[in-house]
Image (cartoon, coloured by chain):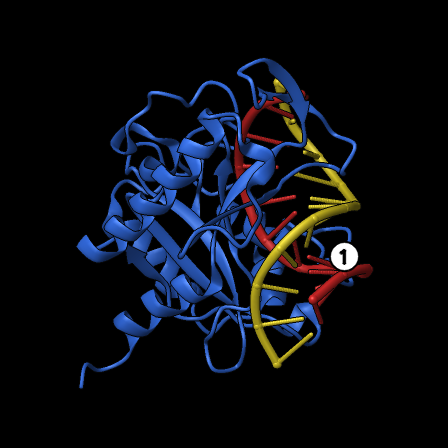
Chain colours: A blue, B yellow, C red
DNA sequence: ACTTGATCATAC
DNA sequence: GTATGATCAAGT
């Protein structure tokens, strides 16, 4: 059952709000899909189910999930207290073509301009996990500044050919980790002397602490 | 317990 | 191979 794209942000939020409290079994049944036993071989299942039900249209294209709204949707696995249990994948790291790019035009910045976060219970039987309260979020000044600092620091290392010195420990809120089918995957990159090399594909990820903070600020009373 | 590095499925 | 969707599982 494919859902038509939402006409505007209000309709998208209305649909997302309607999912709050539902189990993945409920949503899968409404969508006419089967719930897998676990996520071990279906890691993207939850996100793809929610995209389908909300009417995302971009599929596997390098576009926001709702291009006409400029909104990216992300499911977010959370514990029973609503705290994210995993980092959040943002996008592939440009290992050779991203040099000279400004933060404002970067893929990371554009993807994170508007994100619809959909918390999903982590742990327990997959079918019984519930959707939490959705949040349509844009980075505030401080969040944007932190993201920008990390991105600029990491991209500078890449463009200087020092990619191989980058580990997941770099970056306060944005980190770089492998993102590939396996460790044997190779793609072109810039070597230490500026020469072309082959290395493992990498992705940008938001640390769990970053998403935990943004959820707290929006769902807790300030005091 | 938590994070880092590795991996799984699918479309094109 | 690149992109989409992420979580797994080893290491500390």
Q: Residue shown at 61%/35% (left/top)?
A: A164
Q: Which is nearer the eye, A180 or A4?
A: A180
The C terminus of chain A, quarter of image? bottom left
Mark 1: secondary structure? loop
Residue A186 picture location, percent across and down: 71, 25
Residue A168 picture location, percent across and down: 56, 51
Residue A83 in the image: above or below residue A172: below
Instruction: Write down the quadrant of residue A202 in the picture.
Output: top right
Residue A146 picture location, percent across and down: 30, 52
Q: Residue shown at 56%/61% (left/top)?
A: A27
Residue A72 in the image: above or below residue A107: below
The residue beneath circle 1 is A40
Residue found farthest to the bottom? A223
Residue A31 in the image: above or below residue A130: above
Q: Which is nearer the eye, A114 or A34?
A: A114
Residue A215 picture location, percent across and down: 35, 69
Q: Which is nearer the eye, A4 or B11?
A: B11
- Is residue A143 visible from the viewing direction of this image? yes
Pointer 1 chain: A
- Is residue A138 visible from the viewing direction of this image? no
* Residue C10 shown left or right of residue A34 in the figure: right
Packing grade of label 1 (10 A; few <14, some 14-19, many >=20) is: few
């Amino acid at each position: 059952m494919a859902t038509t794209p939402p006409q505007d942000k209000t309709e998208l939020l209305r649909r997302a709000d309607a999912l709050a409290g539902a189990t993945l079994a409920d949503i899968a049944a409404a969508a006419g899909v089967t719930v897998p036993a676990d996520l071990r071989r279906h890691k993207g299942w939850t996100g793809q189910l929610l995209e389908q039900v909300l009417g995302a249209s971009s599929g596997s294209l390098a576009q926001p999930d709702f291009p006409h709204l400029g909104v990216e949707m992300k499911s977010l696995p959370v514990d029973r207290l609503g705290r994210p249990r995993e980092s959040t994948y943002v996008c592939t790291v440009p290992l050779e073509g991203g040099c000279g790019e400004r933060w404002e035009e970067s893929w990371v910045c554009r993807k994170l301009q508007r994100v619809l976060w959909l918390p999903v219970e982590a742990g327990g039987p997959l079918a019984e996990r519930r959707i939490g309260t959705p949040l349509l979020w844009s980075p505030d000044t401080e969040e944007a500044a932190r993201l920008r600092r990390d991105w600029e620091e990491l991209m500078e290392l890449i463009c200087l050919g020092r990619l191989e010195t980058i580990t997941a420990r770099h970056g306060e809120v944005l980190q770089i980790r492998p993102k590939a089918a396996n460790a044997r995957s190779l793609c072109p990159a810039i070597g230490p002397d500026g020469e072309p090399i082959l290395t493992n594909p990498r992705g940008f990820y938001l640390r769990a602490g970053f998403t935990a903070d943004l959820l707290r600020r929006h769902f807790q009373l300030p005091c």
